[in-house]
Amino acid sequence: RSRRRRKKNKKNNMASHSGCQHYVRSCLLKAPCCGKLYVCRLCHDAEENHQMDRFKVREVQCSECQTVQQAQQTCQQCHVLFGEYYCDICHLFDKDKKQYHCQPCGICRIGPRESYFHCEKCNLCLAQDLHGNHKCVENVSRQNCPVCMEDIHTSRIGACVLPCGHLLHKVYRCPLCMHSARNMEDEWDQMDIEITESPMPTEYQGATVKIICNDCQAHCMVPFHVLGLKCSSCGSYNTAQEGGLIQQLQQWPEQDADTDSEAETNMEPELQDQTESSTPH
């Protein structure tokens, strides 16, 4: 019986699967701005016309016994665990995801801590495999994502570190410098196949255009195709067309001339018929 009671008490003290769509926790935050109770700051911000400052939270309410108390990890009344993880700086309660608080970032990150390092120049936590292997951009995360315009530094959505050093939530090329976001060789090979299997109409098969490559910055003259314009320098299809069609097959003037001669030939019998019919018998 004593073992059963211990297991039961231990189970009751664990964080229950309550909370919200953002976090698993057994308490409500008392917003320091308006005094209202919300499961988390994100739920608060979605309902109110102002934002909750997570760092100013001082009180929470237990979801089990409804006791309002100082922010802490365990309820002082019923001893339920508010969250497997708790940060007394960010006042973050959640299930264990190997989180850690990064002092330079000023917020909690999902770890484990040993898998990340804080780049002083980028002012951001990055994966260890990027240590000495990335292009630093000063305070790169202290701006909104250029694609979705949402904050990157405090976002719960992971950001992609592009070869150019910029950060984006999810995209194939950087909208700031237009460089490819990752190795696109497989996509370019597939594009080669699609273009080979989709020849242009005869009148466009000799057309060429000037392009600039967004990846290697080369200026090239390449064959025109509606599916894509391949850089002749690096093989990338991440290119931009400069101007219109430069060259076409010379059949157009010949076809026009043939058409004109046929029209003249067709006109002659009509004139002859009219002349003959106008002659009195």
Image (tube, grey):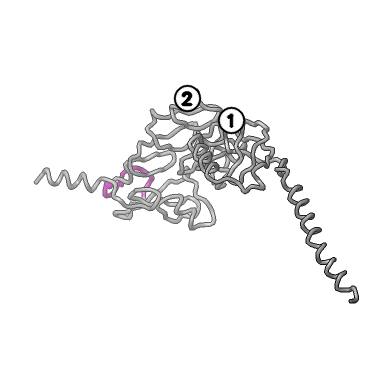
The residue located at (43%, 37%) in the rendering is: 109
Residue placed most toward the observer, 251 or 126: 251
> Would residue 51 be found to the left or right of residue 99 on screen?
right
In 3D space, how far apart are the residues under numbered discs 1 and 2 (Cα atoms)? 27 Å
| Percent position of residue 169, x then y | 50, 42
Residue at 33% x, 55% y: name it: 66
Where does label 2 land, which residue? 131
The residue where tag 1 is placed is: 234
Residues under numbered marks 1 and 2 in contact, where contact means CB atoms less than 8 Å apart? no
In percent of width and height, residue 129 lies at: 44, 27
Side of 26 relative to 201 (left or right): left
Please give the range of residues in magenta.
69-80
Q: How many marks?
A: 2
- Looking at the magenta stretch, what is its main secondary structure? loop
Q: Quadrant of residue 174?
A: top right
What's the residue type where badge 2 is placed? Answer: His
- SS type, badge 1: loop
Is 212 inside the magenta-drawn segment?
Answer: no
Crowd rating for badge 1 (residues with CA inside 10 Å; few <14, some 14–19, many 20+): few
Where is the C terminus found, in terms of image quarters?
Answer: bottom right
Task: Please check the rendered image and state whether residue 75 is part of the magenta-colored stretch, yes or no.
Answer: yes
Picture coordinates of residue 47, whole percent (x, y):
48, 58
Amino acid type of the residue tagged 1 in the rendering: Cys
Coordinates of residue 7 in the picture (x, y in percent): 17, 44
Whichever of labels 1 and 2 marks the residue nearer the N terminus, that label is: 2
Q: Which mark is residue 5?
A: none
Q: Under tag 2, what secondary structure? A: loop
